[in-house]
Amino acid sequence: MIEDDRKAARVLANGLREERFVVDVAHSGETGDQMACVNEYAVIILDLVLPGKDGVSVCRDLRAQKISTPVLMLTARDALADRVGGLDAGADDYLTKPFAFSELLARIHALMRRSDVPLPTVLQVADLMLDPGSHRVMRADCPVSLTRTEYAILEVLMRHPGQVVPRSVLGEHVWQAEVDGLDSLLDVHIGHLRRKIDGTGAHPLIHTIRGHGYLIGSGAP
């Protein structure tokens, strides 16, 4: 989601997470452009009016780079010229603010059904497997029982294999708001994850990148 209104972005992201979507949020066109170029997404929700690089420019540049991820453009403008401009830039659908959350969900699901972007249904890093559909986690074909919070942390890490995920990003994904004592909370839950996933003598997969965040991968960071 690329949306500069932080309150609106938080509300929408929280709603989508309740529907079991994993949501990355960017608050500028430049940041969103970079994220869309290095990660695979099911759908990009793109605000038209952004500081610096606007939504039309972001969409046009993504299409120029052959990124075919479906784009749902959001805007407070309802002028025909704005809708046409967004669609001409490569957007797949258009939703005018204010809108019902149920309509946003319906548009997202429709775009995902039409999309030809192959998305893995099961996430895997080395011999660790996570199935977002069933919430099943396996390490070396053995079931791993996780709490809801542990699962949420692991899913975010596994959707960014080999990449450092900052503590702040994990906090936003898992607790959906700023929380006091975030570092201590994460340390506790990461410790539990390590005992359950890496504590059986298997090759460690979860790594702490001091001063930055966490990384999941089979190689040492």
Image: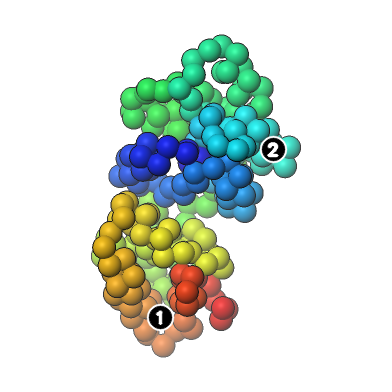
Quarter that holds the C terminus: bottom right
Q: Residue at x 50, y 46 (%)?
A: 26
Numbered tag placed on residue 216 in the rendering: none
Q: Is residue 118 visible?
A: no
Give residue 196's position: percent from left, percent from top: 33, 77
Q: CA distance from mark 1 to mark 2?
A: 41 Å
**Taking 136 as reference, is 26 above or below it?**
above
Dot 2 falls on a residue whose secondary structure is: helix
Q: Nearer the viewer, residue 177 or 153?
A: 177
Q: Nearer the viewer, mark 1 or mark 2?
A: 2
Question: Dot 2 surroundings within 10 Å: few (below 14), some, or many (20 or more)?
Answer: some
Disc on res. 61: 2
Residue furthest out toward the top: 80
Residue at 48% from the left image edge and 83% from the top image edge:
203
Residue 53 is drawn in which quadrant? top right
The total number of labels drawn is: 2
Against 134, residue 91 (above or below) is above
Q: Is residue 78 visible?
A: yes
Rendered residue at 37%/85% (across/down): 200
Asked whether 90 or 145 is in front, the reply is: 90
Q: Disc 1 designates what residue?
A: 198
Pinpoint residue 57: horizontal percent, then vertical percent.
65, 33
Between 145 and 78, the one nearer to me in the picture? 78
Q: Residue reaching furthest front?
A: 52
Is 219 located above or below residue 10 in the figure?
A: below
Residue at disc 1, secondary structure: loop
On screen, 41 above or below 201?
above
Give the side of residue 153 with respect to residue 69, left or right: left
Q: How is the image coloured?
A: rainbow
